[in-house]
Each structure stands twice: as C-alpha cells, then as structure tokens.
Image (spheres, rainbow, N blue to C red):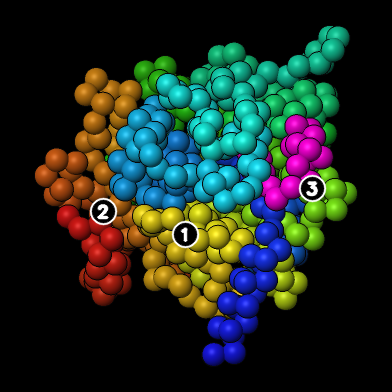
C-alpha cells in the first residue's frame, strides 16, 4: 500500500515537472453510445482513444441540461452550490468571482484556448467566459437550430423526409445531405482546433474543444447516415417505468415542440430520428479523430493529458421521452475517458462511481497544480492508478420541475428532483421547492433493470435498499 501511494505521488511530481498539456474534449447530449461501451454506434476514433485511457463505466452529470452541467463541471461546484439550475442565467451573474477550470490553468502559466461549445453560449447575457481564455473563443453564439449546412454552389437535396420542421424552425429537425464535414458546425470546430493546436503546440496549453453533436438537429453529412442500416439499429422500447410518478417525466418540448401543438410520432419518424442520432455520433467521432491526429502530428501528444466526456446523456424515445432534463439513467449517465501520461494506466476500465464535478480536481492533480478552495468534487487520480479502487459510494444528479422553469412567469422551480446513484440502485425524491416536503419517490434496481422500467419505492422487499440510498442522499442534500 505504501509503495503504491509513493508511486502515485512520484507520478504526480514527475507530471508537475513536465508541465503536461491538456486536451479537453466535450460532446453534447451524448450518452455512452460508443463501441468501447458495448454500443452498436460506430466510433472508431473514440474506441482508439479508450485503448490509451482509463474508461469510467459509471460516470454521471450533476444536472442533465447544458448550462447547469457545464457551469458545474467547469467550476467544480454542484448546481446547488452555484444556485444555478437553468439555461438562461450565466454563472457569473450569481458567482462573479468564481474560478473556472481554464482560468485556473491560465493563472498557473498555461495558454488556454476554447474552440466550439464549452460554456453555454446563448440564452445568457454574457457569451462564454472571456476571462478564462488567453485569446478569444472560437464560438457560434446562436442555437443548435441555426446549424444549417454551408456549401459553395447549390445545396444537395435533403434525403430525410419524414421528420422535418417541428421545433427547429431554421433548419430541418432531421437532415441527410451529401455535404462535406465542414458544411456543419462541428466540422468547422475540428478544423479550428487543428489550427489552434499548430499555434500552441510549443507552449504549455489547455485546449478545450466542444462539439455540438450528437445534439439535435439530427443533420450529419450523408456518409455518416450510410454507416447504419436503420432496420438493424437497437429496437426502441418506449415504455414508461411501471409505478413511476408523473413528475419524473417532461413534455419533450425540445424535439416535439409546445404541448398544444404536439403530434404523436409515427414509428417511421422515431426510427429516422434514432438513425439521425447515431449518424450524429459517428460524425462527431470523426471530428474527434481529426483533432487527435493533429495532436499526434504536432509532437505534443507524448506530453498531453486527454479527457473526453459529455455534458449529459439523452433520451431518444426510451420512457416515451425525447431530449434530456430528467434524472433517469439515460440522461444522467455519460462517457468519460481519461488518458494520462503513464502507459500502465492505458486501456483499463473501472466501475468506480465518478461525477463530472470531479474533472476539475482530477486535471489539476494530473498537472501538478495546487487546488483552489471550494471544489465539490474529488480527484480521480487514485482510480487512474488503481481502477479497482472506489472513491465514493454515490453519484448525484438533480433536475427541477418545470424543467425550464426560468421560462415560466415566476421564474422559480416548483419541485426539485434529487437523485442518488449507488453501485446497484438509483433513488430519486421529488421535493417541494418551498416546503422541502417529499412529494414522490423512485427506486430503480439498476443492476437487474438497467433501463429503469420498474419503480420499487413502495416495494417492502426493497426497504433496506431504499433506506441506504435515502441516507446517502440526505447526507448530501438534507431536507
């Protein structure tokens, strides 16, 4: 034990002396649909990265929507610490002096650059976070619905025909055009990341690259649609969990539009959108591959820590939900790959529970920097050294109701759903925002029911499991 601890500290010291670079890659709305996670998604570049990483099989976001999740992981603070649970409030409106992850690296001698979607770039008054970077961010401040293809000459036809329109009024919700990668935003993000790597390769750098995909609209170039036979994609089970309370669900407005205007999806429409989600994944994977290839070509790879993850997961029809903003596993569970500089850590998997709020202290440790005060997460470096090690008993996710409460007249949540994920269960309790009274409970036995299709909260046979999970939740979030 003492020898392994000594090696761990010696490793951290040597990393500090070398001042490693950081390549920080984030996807959007991406549950762990990767070949290395056992998915039928075609992700050769991410699978290759996994072979030089520790793969975290149980990593979880703190809130399954863009701004709260990104603000949380980039400051190392949970949504309740930041008092931020919506897309419309910039974290600096509430926490003007908080130190972000890239800012901390900048203050410790790194060149920090941001390409693509890192902070949440619209809805808020301030766009991105200029003070975190050594140069202006490469951003697209408009919403995902503005990701229209840009090509010289005539635009090829849209070969997707069954699900156009809906909430993405500026572009089709589903689009299959024979265009180059750079026609859409993520292709341009990859190209800019490659250019930025060439600029900073001889400096100590922290380069953050944020891809939009597989976030809707489902509009990858045609060659990525062609990778899949729609009939052979995993079958959709749209069943809602037995016994689940209504408060656990939402109205899927991101995809289906306002409830008053929603029309039921046909089986063909659902299948086409699921196909589009997988096409988006392979498109994003190809862009990641371009960045990783550029890193290798630059000569900086041997001294670069690489992290890949997503801001949160996503439903594509499961539980009859489309989009995020729930506490279910489909939304809370994220991929997480960490490639550090020690070859003995490469190609390993861990079932240790991890949270996105752990990323900040982990990268600080890997680069030998001091930790700022006030971080809510734990460094995962001990797990990188020993994947069998378990640092924590639980991971926590939360989401308010209404899901987008800041768009309501009073701009206040009515209910907050706090969820705890243990090694074998998920327990969620919904609390009245003002009184803190518990209005509904959920308990899913995730080892035997990974899709969370039966709520066991009222099952006397599971009273002990519920009590254990409830105790963990109350330790973190007292009523």
Residue, x 47% and y 59% (percent of image)? 371
Tell me which numbered mark, 1 or 3, is placed earlier along the sequence.
Answer: 3
Find out whether residue 405 is within the magenta segment: no
Tell me how far mark 2 sits from mark 3, CA to CA: 50 Å
Relative to 369, residue 149 above or below: above
Q: Is residue 294 visible?
A: yes
| First reached walking from the N terminus: tag 1 or tag 2 | 1
Question: In which quadrant is the N terminus drawn?
Answer: bottom right
For label 2, the residue is: 429
Q: Is residue 307 above or below residue 422?
A: above
Spatial CA distance of label 1 from label 2 is 33 Å
Counting residues from the N terminus, which is met first, the one under dot 2 or under dot 3?
Answer: 3
Dot 3, how many residues are within 10 Å of its Cα: few (below 14), some (14-19), or many (20+)? few
Residue 249 visible from this viewpoint: no
Q: Which residue reaches farthest left?
A: 435
Residue found farthest to the top:
154
Quadrant position of the C terminus in the picture: bottom left
In whole angstroms, how far apart are the C-alphas of marks 1 and 3?
25 Å
Residue 202, numbered circle:
3
**Mark toward the viewer: 2 or 3:** 3
Residue positioned 73% across, 53% down in the render: 46
- Label 2: few (<14), some (14–19) or many (≥20) C-alpha neighbours in 10 Å: many
């Amino acid at each position: 034990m003492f020898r392994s601890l000594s090696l761990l500290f010696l490793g951290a010291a040597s990393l500090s002396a070398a001042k490693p670079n950081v390549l920080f890659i984030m996807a959007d709305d991406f549950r762990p649909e990767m070949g290395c996670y056992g998915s039928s998604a075609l992700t050769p570049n991410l699978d290759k990265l996994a072979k030089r990483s520790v793969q975290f099989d149980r990593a979880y976001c703190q809130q399954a929507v863009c701004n709260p999740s990104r603000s949380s992981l980039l400051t190392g603070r949970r949504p309740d610490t930041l008092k931020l649970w919506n897309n419309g409030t910039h974290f600096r409106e509430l926490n003007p002096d908080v130190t972000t992850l890239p800012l901390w690296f900048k203050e410790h001698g790194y060149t920090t650059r941001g390409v693509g979607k890192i902070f949440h770039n619209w809805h808020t008054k301030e766009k991105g976070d200029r003070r975190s970077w050594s140069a202006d961010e490469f951003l697209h401040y408009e919403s995902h619905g503005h990701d229209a293809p840009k090509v010289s000459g005539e635009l090829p036809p849209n070969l997707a025909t069954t699900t156009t329109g809906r909430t993405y009024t500026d572009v089709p919700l589903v689009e299959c055009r024979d265009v180059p990668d750079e026609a859409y935003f993520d292709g341009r993000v990859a190209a800019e990341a490659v250019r930025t790597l060439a600029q900073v390769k001889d400096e100590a750098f922290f380069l953050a690259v944020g891809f939009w995909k597989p976030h809707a609209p489902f509009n990858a170039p045609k060659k990525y649609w062609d990778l899949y036979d729609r009939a052979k994609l995993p079958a959709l089970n749209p069943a809602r969990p037995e016994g689940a309370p209504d408060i656990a669900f939402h109205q899927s407005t991101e995809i289906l539009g306002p409830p008053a205007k929603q029309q039921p999806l046909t089986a063909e429409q659902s299948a086409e959108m699921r196909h589009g989600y997988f096409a988006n994944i392979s498109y994003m994977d190809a862009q990641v591959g371009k960045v990783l290839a550029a890193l290798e070509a630059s000569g900086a790879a041997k001294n670069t820590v690489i992290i890949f993850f997503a801001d949160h997961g996503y439903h594509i029809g499961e539980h009859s939900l489309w989009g995020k903003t729930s506490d279910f596993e489909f939304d809370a569970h994220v991929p997480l790959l960490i490639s550090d500089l020690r070859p003995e850590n490469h190609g390993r998997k861990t079932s240790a529970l991890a949270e996105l709020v752990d990323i900040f202290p982990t990268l600080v440790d890997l680069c030998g920097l001091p930790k700022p005060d006030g971080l809510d997460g734990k460094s995962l470096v001990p797990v990188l050294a020993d994947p069998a090690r378990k640092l924590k008993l639980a991971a926590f996710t939360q989401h308010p109701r209404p899901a987008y409460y800041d768009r309501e007249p009073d701009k206040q949540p009515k209910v907050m759903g706090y969820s705890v994920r243990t090694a074998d269960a998920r327990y969620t309790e919904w609390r009245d925002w003002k009184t803190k009274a518990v209005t509904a409970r959920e308990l899913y036995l995730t080892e035997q029911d990974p899709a969370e299709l039966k709520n066991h909260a009222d099952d006397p046979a599971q009273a002990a499991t519920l009590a254990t999970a409830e105790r963990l939740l109350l330790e973190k979030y007292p009523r």
